[in-house]
Image: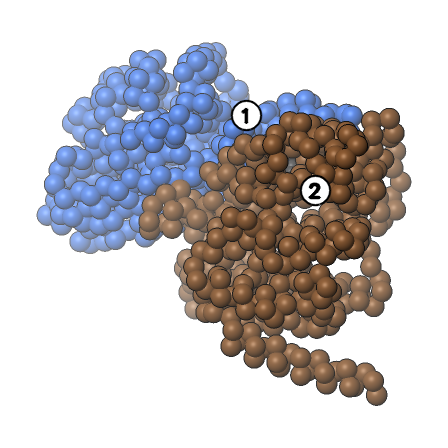
Chain colours: A brown, B blue
Amino acid sequence: MEATADKKDLKKFRKETREWLDANCPESMRQPITGPEDVYWGGRNGEFKTPDFKIWFEKMHAKKWIAPHWEKQYGGGGLDRMEYKILTEEMSRLGCRKPLFSFGLSMLGPALLKFATEEQKIKYLNDIVDAKIRWGQGYSEPGAGSDLANVQTKAEDKGDHYLVNGQKVWTSYGEKADMIFCLVRTDVEVPKHHGISFLLIDMATDGATTRPIKLISGKSPFCETFYDNVKVPKENLIGTEGQGWDIAKYLLTHERQMIGGIGETHVPTPVSDIAKKYLEIKGDVMTDAVLRAEIAKFEMDEAIFDMTIERVIDEAKAGNNSGALSSFFKFYGTELNKRRYEIMVACQGIDGLAWEGEQYNHGAIAKQFLRTKGNSIEGGTSEIQLNIISKRILGLPTR
Amino acid sequence: MALILTEEEQLLKTSASELFKSKAQIAALRKLRDEKDPLGYSKSLWKEMSNLGLAGLTISEAYGGLDFGYVGLGQVLETCGRTLVASPLVSTVLLSGTAIQLGGNEAQKKQYLPGIASGDSIFAFAMDEGKHHNPENCNTKITNNLISGNKTMVIDGHVANYFIVAVKDEKGISKLVVVNAKNEGILVEKIEMMDSRNLANVRFENVKVEDILDSYSSSTNLIENVLDVARIGLAAEMLGGIQEAFSRTIAYLKERRQFGVPIGSFQALQHRAAEMFGEIELCKSVVIKSLKAIDNQSDDLPKMASLAKAKLGETYKRVSNEGIQMFGGIGMTDDEEIGFFLKRARVVQHTLGDTNFHLDRLAKMKKY
Ligand SMILES: Cc1cc2nc3c(=O)[nH]c(=O)nc-3n(C[C@H](O)[C@H](O)[C@H](O)COP(=O)(O)OP(=O)(O)OC[C@H]3O[C@@H](n4cnc5c(N)ncnc54)[C@H](O)[C@@H]3O)c2cc1C
């Protein structure tokens, strides 16, 4: 009996959600995102690209749907998993963009929910939801990429503060970040995994600087960040000293789900539609038979990957959760995205490889295509994900 | 016919490689790109290349060339591929020089070939009319010695002194014609490409033709023959890029350390590297064999050209993707040069037919 009552409520919730979204989501916020400049990131210097960005953010914010599944005291909407799933589905159905893109929402938030003190949660989570702080991720260093536990940036205990010295690299949007969540070494005596701590650093502090790095796409969305005698208040430590590696790993599972496309509400244009637009079709059949087969196989894998995400999320709801599965999602989702762009470029032929020019949309496709090559590197490379699957899911022995 | 280079061919390769080592590293291409050089290549380098005889390798001695053959030109193209040398070698020598040599009559050869061999004339070959290579798609018409139509992907179209244009006459017969770039009615739009080499879209509106190249047994065969020679030449260029990208990747696997060891000690990477090694061995064979097929005027040329272009396109894609992946974060940066190979790989792959195009063509040749 209870189950049917539940079902009814969910039906009602779905109907109301759909109506609300349809009434409140501006038309332009239902259009495909063209790149990282085309979303609202919030932060101290956050800018709305057009008034619709502002309207959409404010509507969703008032509705408490910036972080729909967080508890209310943290600025969330308090939705349960089923409601959250319905909201995500309805947003996808209408093609609604997320009102706020934020590493705070997708990465730091979940880690704070699990490891931070109540005081820290109230403060930082609300700031994330209110888009007051834009966060960056300070994990990688020149000598600590795949071997992340090798971080050398040092934080010395100076009584009321930590003194931080060192360098991070590949910090996405580092020059735009108000604060960075950093892995720092607080103990050099213990084995490397045990000497790491998780510290929140305000980039406005003296001694914190950034230098942009240019990507192969010609854009500079990531940075080197330098810490030269940066004083960080003690209360910015999350968890305990030495707990950094556990927090880092937990956060990475969320990051990997995000990069793998989980929780994405925006539905990309089907590759086959793109193919139809650019390639010769004779009697419903693409004349490039090889590409046709490639596209069909891609669409098979894409559709079934979506089903797999759905199944695993539902299973997790029923209590079967394996953190290691996020490695599979990260691996498969990013490899799929790379395939998507290979196909898109192939469809557009030489036009898809133009770099400048109005009629080629200033090389948008070529540049996006190049950017996707980083998908299987950022957040832990494909190789590292496969290693984790082998070890943690398959239980294969190590040497 | 052994599948090895003669001593002369080996010597030629070495001297080209020495020239590029000092004058045309990837830094040179980066400079042309960053300075938005209007030519897209270095005039002084082209002069030096021509002085070495590289522009006249495939041109008969009677017209100022060295008559060295396509195996020789292939070695130079391969060497260019290693450091992504931007020069008019493909447009002027490989495509247009071949077209005139094969299709021109005595007078035409006399008129155009010496300028090519000396490096003084730049020729562009205008063939395709869409975003995908398709020789059958030709709507550029010739009537009363005037041509009209739109050409795409014209390599070096923005710097050419002459165009060789594929057209159709009133009877629908394909022809190659020579057009002086100074003639009225030509509109050239330069396009910056991902690989920092220039292509152009060229519009011809009632443009006067200088010459029709019709000394070949059949004009359709002439176009196919020129294209096949050029496809093989591009495959040779790709072979250079593939080998260079691969050896840089291998060097990085030996040098970069994570987890206290060189990343090249991880079997996951070792096996992929070893597989690529095997693919590259295949590439070397099809390139040398198809270059020799040109010099021997083999009947198998269309098949060899498609085999070479398909295989090299596929392998260049694989090796350039793997290069970035194995370099990790650094591979995604513009400072690191490995990404330049990925960019060139995609553009050269689409030039004169990508892997799919040639697989399909091979299937059609065998009637399945
Ligand atoms: C676009 C982009 C954005 C990024 N954003 C951020 C960010 O915001 N914050 C941040 O901290 N970092 C960021 N990164 C860094 C990213 O996390 C690292 O690049 C990544 O972890 C790989 O480290 P590395 O670059 O040092 O490569 P390396 O670790 O040197 O890897 C080189 C190659 O070796 C392979 N390899 C290494 N170890 C093994 C092994 N055990 N078995 C098999 N193969 C192995 C790798 O898979 C890779 O192919 C970003 C990276 C990119 C490309």
Residue at the disc numbered 1: B244
Q: Please state which amino acid type lies under the numbered disc 1.
A: Glu
Q: Crowding near pointer 1: few (<14 within 10 Å), some, many (20+)?
A: many
| Depth order, front residue of A275/A168 | A168
Checking the image for residue A200, the label placed there is 2
Kindly tell me whether residue A301 is visible in this rendering. no
Front label number (1 vs 2): 2
Discs 1, 2 touching: Cβ within 8 Å = no
Mark 1 vs mark 2: tell me if same chain: no
Which residue appears at 63% of the width and 43% of the height? A179
Q: Please state which amino acid type lies under the numbered disc 2.
A: Leu
Q: Position of residue A347 (x, y in %)?
A: 46, 53
Above/below status of B45 relative to A318 = above
Q: Crowding near pointer 2: few (<14 within 10 Å), some, many (20+)?
A: many
Which residue appears at 48% of the width and 53% of the height? A47
Residue labelled 1 has its Cβ within 8 Å of some atom of ligand 1: no
In what element is the residue under mark 2?
strand
Q: Position of residue A158 (x, y in %)?
A: 77, 30
Q: Chain of mark 2?
A: A
Q: Quadrant of ligand 1?
A: top right
| Depth order, front residue of A181/B284 | A181
